[in-house]
Image (cartoon, grey):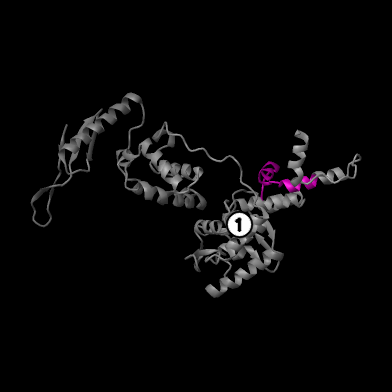
Amino acid sequence: MSVYRPKYRDQKTGKLKSASQWWYDFVYDGQRYRQSAKTTRKTIATQAEEDRRRELQESRATGKPKINRQRRILTVQTALAAYKKAHPINHREKGAQIVLERSAPLERHLGGLVNADLSEERMTAYMIDRRAEGAGNRTINMELAVLSRALGSKFQILWPTLKRLEERRDVGRALSPEEEQRIVNAASHSNSGMIGPIVRIALITGMRRDEIRLLKWSQIDFENKRITVGNSKTAAGRGRVIPLRGTLEGVVTAYASWYMSKLGSIRPEWYVFPFSNRRRPIGPDRPVTSIKTAWGSVCKTANVRCRFHDLRHTVCTKMAEAGVPESTMKAIMGHMSPGMLERYSHIRHAAKVDAIEAVESRSAFFDGKVSPKVGDSESAIATVTH
């Protein structure tokens, strides 16, 4: 074993001096390992050398890859910073945005810890803390997935007996007319000048959040009254055309006037919903990074628990209830298959009752009686059971 403090020559005095940190230097299996122990204490440096030797021995005995010691001693904050910097190189913008959003609570709760501190007990405590803050199970699972990738490993390797939180298996829901109205009212009175139009566009067109967020003025054709969707989650969604008529045209036109009042003009290459300080646009050459805060405020004010994506479910449901042909729904929503369309179509019970009554009225055995209303179901059940 050999631990030492490297010598260096002071450029001012020419004298040899010892570095403050200790290093270790040894040969194992024909390879030399010379590394800083990152400590000013000799006893800790000696222990670091022993640990490094043990890691190499275990690696050779088990056949597992050698542990990257530099990565092992990184703090969570440093590891996340490196991951956030490298991630956008070969990932979509949406993925990079998710990493940014999920990193924030990790840095707040775990930023100063190193990999060795991230025991399963500590991660369980993190889950409990985040649940207490109101985070959903899926959100917490995504945060830990980001952390594991930033640490260069997999969830099941870092925490082999730690179970992911159970996530909701439903596919969202359609808002009731009352909930929809409360959402629209809350968005219209928000301090943000953009969340109101964003919500109303979503509730009319069924466009996804990022399809709206990344819209450019060149995609809105006022003359021919159409909106062309740009980059989309699916190939079927990219480039689809949505009519710019009625209420939608009014919303977009009014927003364009507000936009011009803030920026003085509108250019085709500018984003419709630009980078903002929450009250006014300040960087039209880049899109708003996130609407999470504004959307959360809208839901809280409206007293409605839903995801932004549920607005898309709501549009698809209303189209299905109105009898819009499946081919037209697919052209507007951008779905690739009937199965995916079915996933988003939550036909409300009232509409199903109307459909059954319509079938009955056209049946040969229809007796002319009006089907009982949904509200009468309890009394009907009581009559049968008694």
Q: Please indicate, yes or no, whether residue 298 appears anywhere in the rendered image.
A: yes
Q: Give the range drawn in magenta.
A: 334-355
Vertical side of 232 occupied by 160: above or below? above
Vertical side of 67 occupied by 372: above or below? below
Label 1: state its secondary structure: loop
Residue at image point 47% right, 51% down = 96
Q: Which residue lies furthest to the front in this view?
A: 386
Name the foreground residue: 2 vs 197.
197
Check the picture and name the quadrant holding the C terminus.
top right
Residue at image point 48% right, 38% down = 165
- What x and y, as percent, mark residue 202? 63, 57
Chief secondary structure of the magenta span? Answer: helix
Check the picture and name the quadrant holding the N terminus.
top left
- What x and y, as percent, mark residue 260? 57, 73
Name the foreground residue: 272 vs 29.
272
- What x and y, as percent, mark residue 176? 66, 53
**Amino acid on which the number 1 mark rests in the picture:** Gly
Q: Which residue was labeled with disc 1?
A: 230
Q: How many marks are shown on the rendered structure?
A: 1
- What x and y, as percent, mark residue 334? 66, 50
Residue at image point 37% right, 47% down = 109
In magenta stretch: residue 347:
yes
